Amino acid sequence: MRDLLRANQRETIAFSVLVALLVSYLATHPAGPTTYVMTIWANQCLILALAAIAQFFAVIVRGIDLSVGAIMALTNCIASYLVIGTGAEMTFGIIIVLAAGVGCGVLNGLLVVYGRIQPIVVTLATASVFVGLALLLRPTPGGQIDYDLADALTLDVLGVPTALIVTVAVIGLIWVPLRRTGLGLGLYAVGSSEQAAFQSGMPIARIRLASFALGGLFAGLAGLYFSLVTTTGDAGIGPNFTLNSIAAVVLGGVALRGGVGTLTGAIAGAFILKTIGALMFFSGLPPLAQPFVEGLILAAAIAIGGADVLRVKNKLEVFGR
Amino acid sequence: MSGLMQRLPSMDSLVPYIGTILLILGGSVFYPQILGFEYLTQQLQISAFLGLLALGATLVILLGHIDLSVPWILGGAAILSTSLAGTGDAVLTALAIPAALLFGGLIGIVNGVGVAILRIPSMVWTLAVNSMLLGVAVLNTGGFNPKGEASDTMIWLATGQLAGIPAAFLVWMLVAGMMALVLTRSGFGRYLSAIGYNEKATFLSGVSTPSVIFAAFAIAGVCSALGGVLLAGYANQAYQSMGDPFLLPTIAAVVIGGTSILGGRGSLVGTIGGVLFITLLTSILSVMQISDAWRNITFGMIIIVMLLLQTLRKKGS
């Protein structure tokens, strides 16, 4: 147990912070720890967590994805047309929504791998295209999502918020198995040292493409879940999610230089970020001071994460970071 | 001979100029007024706002870093200068511009401390600084558009003309000229690129790398603040989130100008070309009165094509 904690030091820290925040949130909330309060909290967290997972797949291979929010906006707008009607129609709609997400991710991947352009620049440009497509579909917010499906996936099962069940399922059914495959290993190899991975005969191009496709898939899932929570389509949701997803992965211990961090950490980071926001709301601070305190906490959290650099004895060590 | 070759602008930095000329010629087929003197000088005036931001961003990107606090340094400088000028007091009005520039420089140093001393990735640290600035602005203005107005100097700088040339464009070129002098005539420019290539090696050769990083971020902050001052003069007021639409075009302009996002390679000449290209592209797309959606799509596609052309050219040579 002790070894497990030490091996996952960054995640352990992130989780303890999250638990502390959650306890103080539930303690300050006027309604207390009811299922209703937990459900609303978990829904908001899961949306950002899915976006953070999308960002994680870009960051782990030493990239960055500025189109996460744009893919969410696009898939959200598609869902607002298709995820309604009979069961078969909705299934078809969900498949199309997720396929759109994967398609966006693959497009990013192709431009990065074969166009030889840096990920940050590629996704900057494709984000503009995706938002444009979303605006074509929904010039103004509107549309509808099937209420029964939305209720089923955004309320609770026997008192446990469905969003938390989905979170556990993503970790248990997708991440843990994936980590053990060749692709899971390849993601870390490419992120740590592309050259070394190449020289060991790893299919770099395919791994990068796969990581972008997975990123697109999760951005699509984030868009879909956002649709279920809000039950409308809105092309303007992107920018906030893109920047918050980057902050979330960093809070969760994923290194922006690639190769370090886990998907579980990214999820924890997203939950932390959202809980800070929720905590602000009930903290009794004057409403106008809240955005500033929120920014301050974010900066402090990141600075503390980087503070061990001050203890480094050999000054040269800091350059490898 | 090699000295001469170095002085000539590289092909990378010429691409956006060629693109700009093609845009003007292509646009004028459908809209002859684009070739008019009035339209083109107006474009020079508008491009100065983005241009100032992009000059600062070029320095930071040459280092291999990125500055995401541009929007609220711009917004903060605009709010600060308009509220000082709005008091009507002669002394405070005169202080409006220097105070705004000082503010930009200070925030730039805060950025530099996080990046150079705490070693936090610039993308995250400047993002956090940006959200703190937003918080301070909301706290001070109550979330409404701040009161105050631009001083006469600010208005003249943004909208005035000198011998038929927009003053804003002259300010931009003046800053670019001074920056080019510093970059080519002092060690600073070489240190910037050297850190972008390999920070460790630069440190080992005796360069005080933290000071270079401080200076670059501080200059970038001053540039963003100057952009905010001009923009406030142009609109005669400051408004919430006035800087947000500038962040991504700034990065796009620098990259289209041939500066590597990884740092170490790039030029101011290219950035100026990139700014002219982006401004003109945005302007022509809005002259064509196509919907917001198609404007976004075309904008993204053209940037991708420009970048792919750069890759193709490198493969060819």
Image: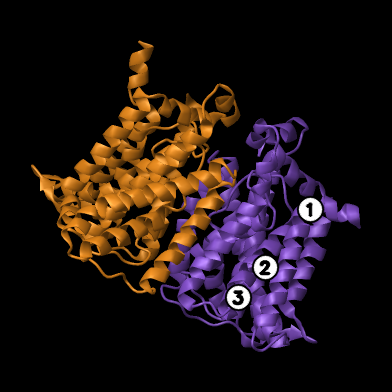
Along the viewing direction, whichever of A18 and A123 lies nearer the viewer: A18
Q: The N terminus of chain B lies in which quarter of the figure? A: top left
Outermost residue to the right: A1
The mark found on residue A9 in the picture is 1
The answer to whether B170 appears left or right of B286 in the picture is left
State the separation of the CA atoms marked 2 and 1. 18 Å
Marks 3 and 2: in contact by CB < 8 Å? Answer: no
The answer to whether A15 appears left or right of B296 in the picture is right
What amino acid is labelled 1 in the image?
A: Gln
Give the colour chain A carries in the figure. Answer: purple
Residue at the (47%, 24%) spot, across then down: B317
Say which label, 1 or 3, has the lower sequence index.
Answer: 1
Along the viewing direction, whichever of B120 and B40 lies nearer the viewer: B120
The chain holding disc 2 is: A
Q: Is residue B196 above or below residue B300?
A: above
Marks 3 and 1: in contact by CB < 8 Å? Answer: no
The answer to whether B122 appears left or right of A181 in the picture is left
> The chain coloured orange carries which letter?
B
Which class describes the residues within 10 Å of circle 2: few (<14), some (14-19), or many (20+)?
Answer: many
